[in-house]
Image (cartoon, grey):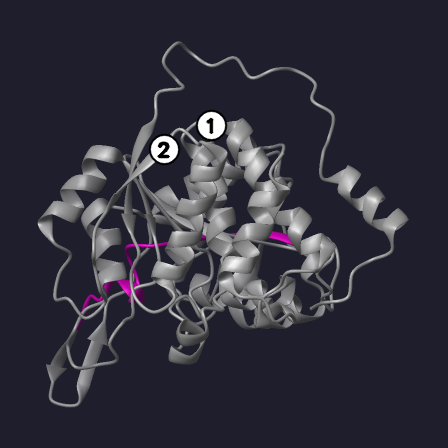
Amino acid sequence: MATTRSAPLLKHLLARLNPARSVTYMPRPGDGTPRAVTLIPGDGIGPLVTGAVEQVMDAMHAPVYFEKYEVYGDMKAAPAEVLDSIRKNKVCLKGGLATPMGGGVSSLNVQLRKELDLYASLVNCFNLPGLPTRHENVDIVVIRENTEGEYSGLEHEVVPGVVESLKFCSERIAKYAFEYAYLNNRKKVTAVHKANIMKLADGLFLESCREVATRYPGIKYNEIIVDNCCMQLVSKPEQFDVMVTPNLYGNLVANTAAGIAGGTGVMPGGNVGADHAVFEQGASAGNVGNEKVVEQQKANPVALLLSSAMMLRHLQFPAFADRLETAVKKVILEGKYRTKDLGGTSTTQEVVDAVINALD
């Protein structure tokens, strides 16, 4: 078990997690109707952590119910009924799907993003009170293009031994990043690029960001080359706020930022397009886990629990989202129940039980 904090300090920090309510949320008639959510447990630790979410949602009596489908990373394509369910429900919660290495088998994760046009990936990397990290005051949101560029799988062999990968960017990811910053009272957007080398593709990305930035004079805008960005992330991460990136850079930056802020097991995220949203563990590293973690039932459910809080806000159930997020943060702060990746010895179920007990 991790060491608990002194009672006075713990009481003070817990008080910070419960801000006084000011103005009430006024729903529209019918907003409390339970919403259907497509659920994909996935591979590896996926069934463990999605099962954790199901338990907590049930304990809260949250106004959602799940339509569960068995989908695995070694499938050639997502079953049609799964895509139909997501299109109908508009919202999906998923565990990790293992991606085969090489062999011409495309990633189901990428297929889902392209089929549903989930062009924006969002990962929120922030310090959790009570979880020691090398850097403090980290609160970064990485928004990356999700359907174009290297991860789109648009590559082919021109002649034997020569492979060409197509890379291009879209203005809509820049629009989404600034809109997100505007709606969430964020102060700065940083564009991450390699335009000094990729002059056409990344140059177009920067042109789009610069043009969109002119529409948001209240938000500071700057640019950083990706290699310098990685160095700055590990040395002074608190300088970053919202980061907008092309596809490949964003995956690397998000996983780096997650490691700095406390680990991939506690960082929430999701993928969103004009019509649909899929919520999952924010940083991709470790989202499937390994056999030992599965056998010992010690997967960390925190990232997906926080992602489900994001989902509840997306569904306009803010009070339920607040309850869930506050309960998770209480458990992390108290330090009694933590999985191995956070320095503890707890099982997934022990963390889930602690979160349920912490619900207001």
* Residue 120: image location, x then y, percent: 37, 48
Distance in Å between CA atoms under marks 2 and 1: 10 Å
Residue 146 falls inside the magenta stretch: yes
Query: Which residue is situated farthest in the right direction here?
Result: 8
334 vs 42, nearest the viewer: 334
Q: Is residue 310 left or right of residue 354?
A: left
Question: How many numbered discs?
Answer: 2
Q: Residue at x 32, y 48 (%)?
A: 119
Kind of residue at disc 1: Phe
- Stretch of the chain drawn in magenta: 139-155
* Residue 248: image location, x then y, percent: 39, 66
Q: Label 1: few (<14), some or many (≥20) within 10 Å? A: many
Q: Residue at x 72, y 34 (%)?
A: 18
**Residue 66: quadrant of the picture:** top left
Q: Is residue 6 left or right of residue 110?
A: right
Residue 192 falls inside the magenta stretch: no
Evaluate if marks 2 and 1 touch, with contact meaning CB atoms under 8 Å apart: yes
Q: Is residue 297 left or right of residue 15?
A: left
Assign the N terminus to one quadrant of the image: bottom right
Q: Is residue 180 above or below residue 69?
A: above
Secondary structure of the residue carrying tag 1 is: loop
Q: Which residue was labeled with disc 2?
A: 64
Q: Is residue 25 above or below residue 135?
A: above
Q: Which residue was labeled with disc 1?
A: 317
Secondary structure of the residue carrying tag 2 is: strand
* Residue 179: image location, x then y, percent: 48, 35
Q: Is residue 298 left or right of residue 31?
A: right
Q: Residue at x 17, y 90 (%)?
A: 161
Mark nearer the N terminus (2 vs 1): 2
